[in-house]
C-alpha cells in the first residue's frame, strides 16, 4: 500500500502553507486562527500561531491532520489554477460594478494571439456541464476542459503599478510569450 506523505507540518510557517495551499486558510480559520493575512502571522510556524491562540499539542496535531486530509482532497498547485487574493478582489469589484454578482468569471485559452494561444477572461451567467468550477472568497470561476491542460499550475494575479496594470497570468506551461503578456506558446 502506498503511503501518502503529509504536505503540511506544524513547523511550516503559516504564510508558506497558505501560499502553497490556499484551501488551508479555511481550515486554519476553523481552528480559531482568524488572523490569516495579519502582518506577523505569515512568519509564525503553525505550531507557534496555534499556541498563541491557546491550543495544546493534541489540538495542534488534530488541526495539522485535518489540514493534510483537506489537501489530499484538493488538487495540488501544479494541477490547478491559482487566483491570488488581489485578483479575486478585483474580480469581485468588477462583478459588483456591473451588477452581475451571480455570474462566473470565465478563464480560458483560445488559439490565436501573437504566440499561438491567447488568454481569455470574461463574465458568464452560467457554467457549462464540462467546466471545472473553482470558488474563492465568494467569486466563482469556470474553466473549460480544453483550456485546463494549458493552464495547470498557472497563477492569475492582478497588478496595479506605474508600468503595468491588469490581470496577469504566470503560466509555467508557457514556453514563450509575447510582449503584450496576453499570448503564449
Image (cartoon, rainbow, N blue to C red):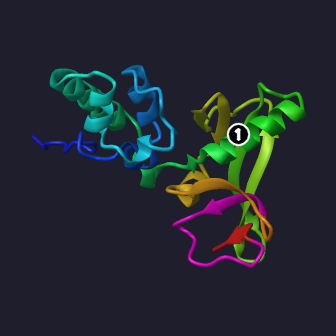
Residue lying at 68% horizontally and 52% vertically, measured from the top left: 108
Q: Which quadrant does the N terminus fall into?
A: top left
Local packing at callout 1 (Cα closer than 10 Å; few below 14, some 14-19, many 20+) is: some
User: What range is drawn magenta here?
Assistant: 165-180
Residue 121 locus on image (x, y percent) = 76, 50
Residue 24 locus on image (x, y percent) = 41, 35
Q: Looking at the image, which residue sits at the far left? A: 1
**Front residue of this view, candidates 12 and 151:** 12
Q: Looking at the image, which residue sits at the far right? A: 98
Residue lying at 82% horizontally and 39% vertically, measured from the top left: 94
Q: Residue 185 falls in which quadrant of the image?
A: bottom right
Residue lying at 66% horizontally and 46% vertically, measured from the top left: 86
Residue 47 locus on image (x, y percent) = 25, 36
Q: Residue 131 falls in which quadrant of the image?
A: top right
Q: Is residue 7 above or below residue 53?
A: below
* Number of disc labels: 1
Secondary element type, mark 1:
helix
Q: Is residue 46 above or below residue 50?
A: below
Does the magenta-highlighted stretch encompass residue 172? yes
Q: Main secondary structure of the magenta part?
A: loop
Q: Is residue 25 above or below residue 14?
A: above
Q: Which residue is mark 1?
A: 89
Q: Is residue 157 above or below residue 35?
A: below
Left or right of 140 in this view: 46: left
Amino acid at each position: 500500500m502506498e503511503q501518502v506523505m503529509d504536505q503540511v507540518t506544524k513547523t511550516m510557517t503559516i504564510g508558506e502553507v497558505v501560499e502553497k495551499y490556499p484551501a488551508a486558510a479555511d481550515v486554519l480559520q476553523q481552528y480559531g486562527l482568524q488572523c490569516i493575512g495579519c502582518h506577523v502571522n505569515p512568519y509564525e510556524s503553525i505550531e507557534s500561531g496555534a499556541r498563541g491562540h491557546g491550543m495544546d499539542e493534541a489540538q495542534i496535531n488534530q488541526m495539522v491532520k485535518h489540514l493534510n486530509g483537506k489537501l489530499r482532497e484538493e488538487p495540488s498547485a501544479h494541477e490547478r489554477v491559482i487566483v491570488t487574493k488581489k485578483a479575486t478582489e478585483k474580480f469581485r469589484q468588477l462583478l459588483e460594478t456591473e451588477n452581475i454578482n451571480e455570474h462566473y468569471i470565465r478563464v480560458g485559452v483560445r488559439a490565436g494571439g501573437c504566440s499561438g494561444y491567447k488568454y481569455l477572461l470574461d463574465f458568464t451567467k452560467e457554467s457549462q456541464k464540462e467546466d471545472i468550477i473553482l470558488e474563492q472568497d465568494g467569486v466563482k470561476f469556470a474553466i473549460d476542459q480544453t483550456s485546463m491542460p494549458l493552464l495547470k499550475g498557472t497563477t492569475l494575479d492582478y497588478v496595479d503599478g506605474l508600468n503595468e496594470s491588469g490581470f496577469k497570468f504566470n503560466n509555467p506551461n508557457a514556453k514563450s510569450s509575447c510582449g503584450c503578456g496576453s499570448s503564449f506558446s
